[in-house]
């Protein structure tokens, strides 16, 4: 896991942070990056797109990147709570609270995230189905 630091921007610190090389994350994979002052951010590469969320499950103290990624769904290794990486929405019990999402993009081969634009979609609260439905560990 890499640690990113806030980048000096004149007299202020920018909230746009370089995370690492985009080539480090293959299609259908994910990786966590520690961002000084913001905690761990998980970056996902799905169907040619880039997505970023908090790496910490909103239900259990567990790293989502130590779980599984199935399409746009990340599955927590602790209790199989599921989240949509596009919206942060909790998809099944025991996870009921969404996780924050961050804008992320590739610039000159480097992953860049804007941590000041983190958002939690209020419409993303509530689990839609029971844990384990269709999951190999369920």
Image (spheres, rainbow, N blue to C red):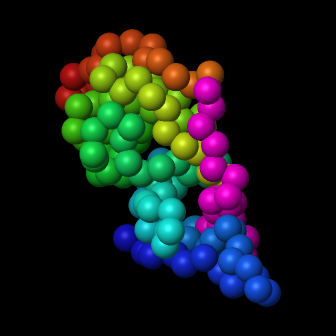
In x, y percent, where is residue 15?
67, 68
Residue 40 belongs to magenta span: no
Which residue occupies the foreground of this view, 11 or 133? 11
Highlighted range, magenta: 104-122
In x, y percent, where is residue 103?
68, 52
Does residue 68 appear in this view? no
Residue 88 figure quarter: top right
* Image-based side of 98 in relation to 111, left or right: left
In x, y percent, where is residue 113?
64, 62
* Image-based side of 120 in relation to 8, left or right: left
Quarter of the image where the N terminus is located: bottom left
Residue 96 figure quarter: top left
Image height check: is 59 above or below 113?
A: above
Residue 113 belongs to magenta span: yes
Does residue 89 appear in this view? yes
Quarter of the image where the C terminus is located: top left
Residue visible at 49% across and 72% down in the picture = 36
Image height check: is 9 above or below 106?
A: below
In x, y percent, where is residue 87?
60, 34
Which residue occupies the foreground of this view, 40 or 138? 40
Residue visible at 52% across and 29% down in the picture = 89
Image height check: is 79 above or below 105?
A: above
Residue visible at 36% across and 41% down in the picture = 57
């Amino acid at each position: 896991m890499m640690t990113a630091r806030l980048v000096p921007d004149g007299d202020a610190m920018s909230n746009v942070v370089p995370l690492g090389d985009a080539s480090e994350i293959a299609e259908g994979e994910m990786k966590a990056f520690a961002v000084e002052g913001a905690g761990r951010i998980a970056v996902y590469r799905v169907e040619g797109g880039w997505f970023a969320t908090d790496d910490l499950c909103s239900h259990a103290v567990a790293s989502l990147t130590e779980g599984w990624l199935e399409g746009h769904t990340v599955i927590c290794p602790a209790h199989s709570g599921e989240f949509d990486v596009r919206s942060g929405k909790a998809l099944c019990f025991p996870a009921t609270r969404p996780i924050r999402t961050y804008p992320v993009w590739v610039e000159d081969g480097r992953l860049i995230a804007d941590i000041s634009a983190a958002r939690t979609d209020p419409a993303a609260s509530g689990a839609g189905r029971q844990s384990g439905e269709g999951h190999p560990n369920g």
